[in-house]
């Protein structure tokens, strides 16, 4: 594994488990088995490293959602619900800490121009746009609104599951998403 990838991998494990503010570059360098000087050779700042951490999560997360969607049996409502059901399964794992994008945005809420905030916003928008495309392909009239509503249910369920440590909230959000999609299909 290339040095840069080792650093991002170490940062990902630490930032996800302990939060970005709770982890210093010394800990990342140690976890990667490198010196701090080597880390700074590849990343000019911790902010740049945090942005790289989120950028590295973007495509794998989107691919996983698409995989769950494609693998689900049934029509569009069941496929959307499957994303929530699979996330609920993930949330039952003891190391699950929620959405890394949302957790990072909460830590950086007072820094809206931070590169990681932009990457997080872009990730959420990509997911919303992908949902919109799926809905449009199915002939749903108000696909942009429905995609936004599903994103709100998803991100809201991430927050509530973290608060209560109860993945059944994610399952309930999935039921609500399914109902929304069914309703929009009937009205299209």
Image: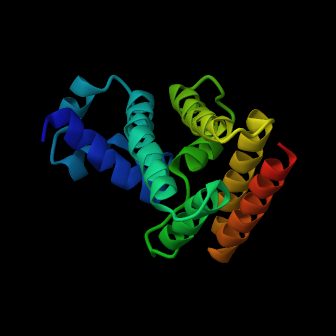
Would you say residue 129 is visible in this rendering? yes
- Give x and y (percent) for residue 77: 67, 58
Residue 112 placement, left or right of 31: right
Relative height, residue 110 to residue 71 (above, below): above
Q: Quadrant of residue 168?
A: bottom right
Which residue: 67% across, 35% down? 136
- Give x and y (percent) for residue 60: 39, 45
- Give x and y (percent) for residue 175: 73, 67
Q: How many numbered dots are placed on residues in this image?
A: 0
Which residue: 64% across, 45% down? 106
User: Which color mode does the image show?
Assistant: rainbow
> Which one is nearer the viewer's eye here, 140 or 102?
140
> Which one is nearer the viewer's eye here, 116 or 91?
91
Residue 166 placement, left or right of 11: right
- State which quarter of the image contains the N terminus: top left
Residue 97 placement, left or right of 23: right
Q: Which residue lies furthest to the right in this view?
A: 187
Q: Residue furthest left?
A: 1
Which residue: 80% across, 38% down? 145
- State which quarter of the image contains the C terminus: top right
Which residue: 17% across, 39% down? 35
Relative height, residue 51 to residue 75 (above, below): above
Relative height, residue 65 to residue 52 (above, below): below
- Give x and y (percent) for residue 155: 67, 52
> Which one is nearer the viewer's eye here, 119 or 8?
119
Q: Quadrant of residue 112?
A: top right
């Amino acid at each position: 594994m290339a040095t840069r990838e080792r650093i991002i991998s170490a940062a990902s494990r630490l930032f996800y488990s302990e939060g970005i503010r709770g982890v210093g570059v010394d800990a990342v360098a140690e976890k990667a088995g490198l010196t701090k000087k080597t880390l700074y050779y590849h990343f000019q700042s911790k902010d740049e490293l945090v942005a790289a951490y989120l950028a590295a999560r973007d495509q794998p997360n989107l691919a996983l959602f698409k995989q769950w969607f494609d693998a689900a049996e049934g029509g569009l409502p069941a496929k959307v619900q499957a994303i929530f059901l699979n996330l609920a399964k993930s949330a039952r794992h003891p190391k699950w800490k929620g959405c890394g994008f949302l957790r990072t945005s909460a830590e950086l809420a007072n820094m809206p121009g931070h590169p990681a905030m932009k990457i997080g916003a872009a990730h959420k928008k990509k997911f919303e746009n992908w949902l919109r495309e799926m809905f449009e392909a199915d002939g749903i009239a108000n696909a942009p609104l429905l995609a936004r509503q599903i994103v709100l249910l998803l991100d809201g369920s991430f927050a509530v599951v973290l608060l209560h440590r109860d993945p059944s909230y994610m399952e309930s959000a999935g039921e609500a998403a399914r109902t929304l999609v069914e309703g929009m299909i009937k009205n299209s």
